[in-house]
Image: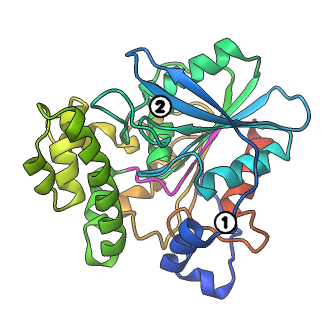
Amino acid sequence: MPIVPSSYKPPFIFRNGTLSTVYSGLFRQPIKINQKRERLTLSDDDFLDLDWSFSKEKTNKLIILLHGLGGNAQRHYMTGNAKLFNENNIDAVCVNFRGCSGEDNLKYRTYHSGETEDLNEIINHIISTNKYREIFIKGFSLGGNVVLKYLGERITIPNQIKACIAISVPCDLNGASLELHKFKNLPYHEMFRFQLKSSLKQKQKKYPELISYSDIKAIKTLKDFDDIYTSKAHGFKDALDYYEKCSSLQFLYNIKIPTLIINAKNDSFLSPECFPIKEAKGNANLFLEIPEYGGHVGFFSQDNIFYNEKRALDFILEYK
């Protein structure tokens, strides 16, 4: 499918990618939404938490929302989407990946950019316990990569899934990793590194036989974290093996339902390989929008309903 033209034109000040990214993450107005938490026991006896919110009217439509690295279901970009969809007669479930809901999960492993089996369990659980006839999925950053990989790696997906959206997606994990390690992204790199190391210290206390304090101390970069923890905890040889096997770029050709990717041109997290122009042109189900502005999961709009939220709703209504 040809590249989709973008209509996103933010106020001048939010044409700065850094400001757009930081404002969305730290300063966006709070979203008021009522949620109900459900704990889902997984097949390996671990758990994750699902935060549900509902349309005022009974509906057979649902959107599943997946957060990014170090995020959770309460991030503004998650609750903002949930509220908008609820107001348009679509229930929403905001997923907390393992260990992200404020309570450490039970296993040494947690989640990563290519973990699609947990998403598959969530979808199967929803289908078996509810009567939704139309299910949509929207992922942000890491969660976007999970959505795209899930769609492309499987021969079939449940026919209830009608359309998907992925925002600010690091389709090529190695390329995105190299970008995050550049000086321009130092504040973000250090923020993620601090968060991830803090979480890993909890794991170390529970699993001293699997990781030592000296191992954690040796983590100086995000790639170190993936070499020392992510890859080893999830069955990969090292960080590069993890990046190679879990990048969604290689699976895009096989996506069989309408799927929209929105990656801003001024997203400092993304390498050139994260803009899959060739793949979009070669797959009639894949729509790629590259706005000039937006930063990383930014896309500010003055009414506190951000552009990527409105765009996702419009896409679903058009292509479901």
Q: Give the magenta range.
A: 163-171
Residue pictured at 41% horizontal, 53% vertical: 170
Residue 195, percent from left and from top: 34, 57
Q: In this view, does 95 lie to the left or right of 236?
A: right
Nearest the viewer among 152 and 12 is 12
Nearest the viewer among 195 and 316 is 195
In the rendered image of this protein, does residue 75 appear above or below residue 271? Answer: above
Residue pictured at 77% horizontal, 21% vertical: 133
- The disc at residue 6 is 1
Residue 223, percent from left and from top: 20, 54
Nearest the viewer among 158 and 228 is 228
Residue 231, percent from left and from top: 21, 38
* Nearer-N-terminus badge (2/1): 1
In the rendered image of this protein, does residue 2 appear above or below residue 269? Answer: above
Seen as rendered, the residue at the extreme left is: 214
Nearest the viewer among 165 and 183 is 183
Residue 91 shown in magenta: no
Which quarter of the figure has residue 45?
top left
Q: Which of marks 2 and 1 is in front?
A: 2
Distance, label 2 to label 1, CA atoms, is 26 Å
Residue 260, percent from left and from top: 61, 48
Which quarter of the figure has residue 20?
bottom right
Residue under numbered circle 2: 150
Which amino acid does the dot numbered 1 rest on? Ser
Which quarter of the figure has residue 319?
top right
Determine whether the residue tagged by mark 1 lies in a helix, strand or loop. loop
Q: How many labels does the image show?
A: 2
Determine whether the residue tagged by mark 2 lies in a helix, strand or loop. helix
Residue pictured at 42% horizontal, 52% vertical: 70
Which amino acid does the dot numbered 2 rest on? Tyr
